[in-house]
Structures are given as C-alpha cells and as structure tokens.
Amino acid sequence: MNKYIPFLIILLLFTGCSKNQGEPYSLSDKDRENINSYLELNFFNPRLKNGKIISVFDVLGSNKNQNEIYVWILIEEVYIEGGQVKRTTGLSQPLVIKVEEENGEIIVKGNKSPRDGEKFNSDINNLFPVKIREIISTYNKEHLEKQLEDKIKMRYQF
C-alpha cells in the first residue's frame, strides 16, 4: 500500500495540472469577428462625437473549462479631420474574455481586465494561468500595431 502512495500523489498532481489548463478553443473567423465586434462596441467608448473605435487582438491561449479566451488587445479611437485619419486615445493590454458557445459559435459574455498601477501585477497573477503570464511578460505588440494600421487604412481606404 505504501509503495502506491507516491504514484497516487504524482497522478493527482498531473490530473490537477491538466484540469487547470483545460481544452483550448478553436476559433473560427466568425468567432474572431464576434470578439472584435465586442471590443469595438462594448469595451472602449469613443470620447469624440465622430470618433470610431478600431481594435485588433492576438489570442494568447484559452480554456474551455473556464469559458475564457486570453488575448492581448490594441484599441484606438480614430476620426476624420480635413480628409485625414487622426488617432486619439488608445489601449494596449492583456484581457480575459468570458465566452459561451451557442450553436457552435463563440458569444462574448464579458471580460476581466487587470487594473492599472500597483494592482496590475497581482491582477495578472489572479486572472491568467501561468503559461499565459509567461507570454504576457515578454509580449511584443509590434505586429498588432501593424495590423491596426492596416485595418485603419482598409476601413478608411487611404
């Protein structure tokens, strides 16, 4: 009996670890559109009367067991003035997107965002699994900046 105890402990550790990671979502183009629409319509409000929100995001991971998709978002408000696109306020940060699946499609139900300032690191630790925290700690958003620039050009055809 005693020789089985270490085996059981190891088995429980592996079972616990795999539960925390959960099965990832496989996102379709429609799912990505749903997430993007949520970000542009609900997450960040324009400050200007003629301002439009444009967003891009990068999926860092997901967990079906928790109904969560972990993303890095880049959002900016843009407007047209004198025939030129002007960029105003923006936001770049990791985000937990809470989702449900309905008829095989991802529906965004909400989000969890780390707070600014001294609470940021503790919120990252509380909101994201270890693997995602490792990605966040070295994340480079340059490709998102390029995607946002391209999206702005496409939307306004400049």
Image (tube, helix red, strand yellow):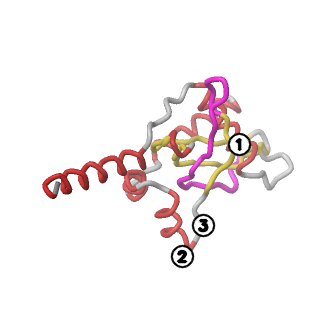
**Which of the two marks, 3 or 1, is nearer to us in this view?**
3
Judging depth in this view, the residue of 110 and 67 nearest the camera is 67
Q: Of helix, strand and loop, which one carries label 2?
A: helix
Q: Which residue is mark 3?
A: 115
Left or right: where 120 falls relative to 6: right
Q: Of helix, strand and loop, which one carries label 1?
A: helix
Q: Of helix, strand and loop, which one carries label 3?
A: loop
Q: Residue at left 62%, top 55%?
A: 112
Q: Residue furthest left?
A: 3
Q: Is residue 13 magenta?
A: no
For residue 127, above or below residue 50:
below
Contact between marks 1 and 2 (CB within 8 A): the answer is no
Can you give x and y, in whole percent of width and height, for residue 158 in the image?
66, 32
For residue 104, above or below residue 96:
above
Can you give x and y, in whole percent of width and height, for residue 23 in the image?
44, 37
> What label sits on residue 118 in the rendered view?
2
Task: Specify which label sits upstream in the sequence, 3 or 1.
Answer: 1
Can you give x and y, in whole percent of width and height, for residue 99 in the image?
62, 40
Give amino acid for label 1: Glu
Magenta-tinted stretch: 86-106
Left or right: where 129 falls relative to 73: left
**Which of the two marks, 1 or 2, is nearer to us in this view?**
2
Cα gap from disc 3 to disc 1, whole angstroms: 20 Å
Q: Residue furthest bottom?
A: 118
> What label sits on residue 40 in the rendered view?
1
